[in-house]
Image: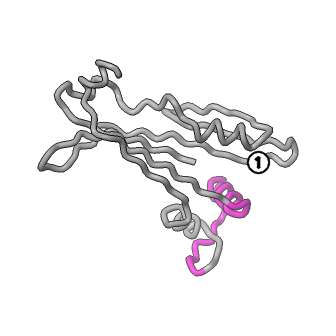
Amino acid sequence: LSYRIEVWEDRANWYDRLINSSTYSYKIAYDNWDTVFCVDALSRGKTETGRFKNLADLLHQVCTQHAFRACPISSLSRDGSYYVTISAAIQALSAERVKEVENWLGGGQSDDDPSKAGGLLGFVVDMFTSKAKRADAKSSIFALEALSRGP
């Protein structure tokens, strides 16, 4: 599961300008032996690990986000107009695909024939095609001045 947060400057009669982009990712696996969901949260070069016994707790952890850092406040101008876009994408990996990637990363041979169901090339193609489920959202336009005043 991956979240991508982008802050854009809304520029009338011109292309909008990307101010900052951040990505937060989760790698989720189910451990059959201990019957727990294992989650690795990856952001800004740090990895945090969690273990969840039930699915509801797991979903609450990865789907309810409250404190993403979108951009430094110093990147915004007081007289600018901005909006935020958020994209969430989830990619399911089969056990066979995970083994193929681990084998390839370990220096093993991979089957790069695109006509076969497996292979590293097939994995890469799957990652960048419609096999992932995706949701996108865009905020209303706001000004930094309005944020500093509060509600």
In this figure, which residue is indicated by the disc labeled 1? 30
Amino acid type for the residue under numbered disc 1 = Tyr
- Which residue is painted at 37% across and 40% down in the image? 21
> As rendered, which of 45 and 140 lies closer to the eye?
140
- Residue 93: image location, x then y, percent: 65, 59
- Residue 35: image location, x then y, percent: 84, 44
Compared to residue 25, the image places residue 142 above or below, namely above
- Check the image and name the residue furthest to the right: 33
- Which residue is painted at 65% across and 65% down in the image? 109
The quadrant of the image that shows the C terminus is top left
- Residue 45: image location, x then y, percent: 51, 33
In the displayed structure, does residue 59 sit left or right of residue 89?
right
Q: Is residue 126 magenta?
A: no
- Which residue is painted at 44% across and 44% down in the image? 4
- Check the image and name the residue furthest to the left: 13
Region in magenta? 94-115
- Residue 117: image location, x then y, percent: 64, 75
Compared to residue 134, the image places residue 4 above or below, namely above
In the displayed structure, does residue 80 sit left or right of residue 29?
left
- Which residue is painted at 84% across and 48% down in the image? 32
In the displayed structure, does residue 54 sit left or right of residue 70?
right
> As rendered, which of 63 and 36 lies closer to the eye?
63
Q: How many marks?
A: 1
